């Protein structure tokens, strides 16, 4: 299966909303309950007025998931929470179709995305992620892609849940 990426466009928002409602995704991505909330959150990113770059994960040129990246320094409260230096990007992803989970697609997508997209910026020297500490599938995908857990922290933005901070240096 060939993995690629393309920037998210407004026409993809119904699909992203559908994925966010799927049980295997909604368990970990709980903050966008309605379609209007999805549009309100992601449309500014698509239009470039918010400093996060959203993409679709393409599997043989068909949408199979979502991935995004951002400079941690563009989000000062988050940067303080995770305590990282300048030159660090963040990444988040989800696999939208349940039948595609558990097949190594997430880790391969992470590996390629970080290498080809995130680290294509010469100012970025590290990439972090912060999945829920109970999300073993996500932790495994990040670790398989070369990320290592550097610490755990409580995220007040996520109902005070424990998260694992993972990091990959260039």
Image (cartoon, grey):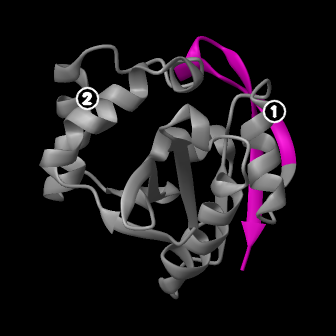
Residue at 48% from the left image edge and 76% from the top image edge: 117
Residue density around tag 2, few if under 14, some if 14–19, many if 20 or more, within 10 Å: some
Residue 124 image point, x, y percent: 56, 77
Residue 106 image point, x, y percent: 64, 53
Residue 107 image point, x, y percent: 70, 58
Say which of 38 and 1 sits in front.
1
On residue 38, the disc is: 2
Residue at 14% from the left image edge and 47% from the top image edge: 10
Indicate the quadrant where residue 19 lies: top left
What span is colored magenta in the figure? 150-170
Residue 94 image point, x, y percent: 53, 42
In space, the residues marked 1 and 2 are separated at their CA atoms by: 25 Å
Q: Determine which residue is flagged by label 1.
A: 136
Instruction: Tell me which secondary structure the magenta stretch mostly adopts.
Output: strand
Residue at 67% from the left image edge and 69% from the top image edge: 111
Residue density around tag 1, few if under 14, some if 14–19, many if 20 or more, within 10 Å: few
In the image: residue 18, left or right of residue 1:
left
Indicate the quadrant where residue 104 lies: bottom right
Say which of 51 and 59 sits in front.
59
Say which of 135 and 51 sits in front.
135
Say which of 133 and 156 sits in front.
133
User: Does 143 lie within the magenta span?
Assistant: no
Secondary structure at badge 2 equals: helix
| Mark 1 vs 2, N-terminal side | 2
Whether residue 154 is situated above or below residue 147 in the rendered picture: above
């Amino acid at each position: 299966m060939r993995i690629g990426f393309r920037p998210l466009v407004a026409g993809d928002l119904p699909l992203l909303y559908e994925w966010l409602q799927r049980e295997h995704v909604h368990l970990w991505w709980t903050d966008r309950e309605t379609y209007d909330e999805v549009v309100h959150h992601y449309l500014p990113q698509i239009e470039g007025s918010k400093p996060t770059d959203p993409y679709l994960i393409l599997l043989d040129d068909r949408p199979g998931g979502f991935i995004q990246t951002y400079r941690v320094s563009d989000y000062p409260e988050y940067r303080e929470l995770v305590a990282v230096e300048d030159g660090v990007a963040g990444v988040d992803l989800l696999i939208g179709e349940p039948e595609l989970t558990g097949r190594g697609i997430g880790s391969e997508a992470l590996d390629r995305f970080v290498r080809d997209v995130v680290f294509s910026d010469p100012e970025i020297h590290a990439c972090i992620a912060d999945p829920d500490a109970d999300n073993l599938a996500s932790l495994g995908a990040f670790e398989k892609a070369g990320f290592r857990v550097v610490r755990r922290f409580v995220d007040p933005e996520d109902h005070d849940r424990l998260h694992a901070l993972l990091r990959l240096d260039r």
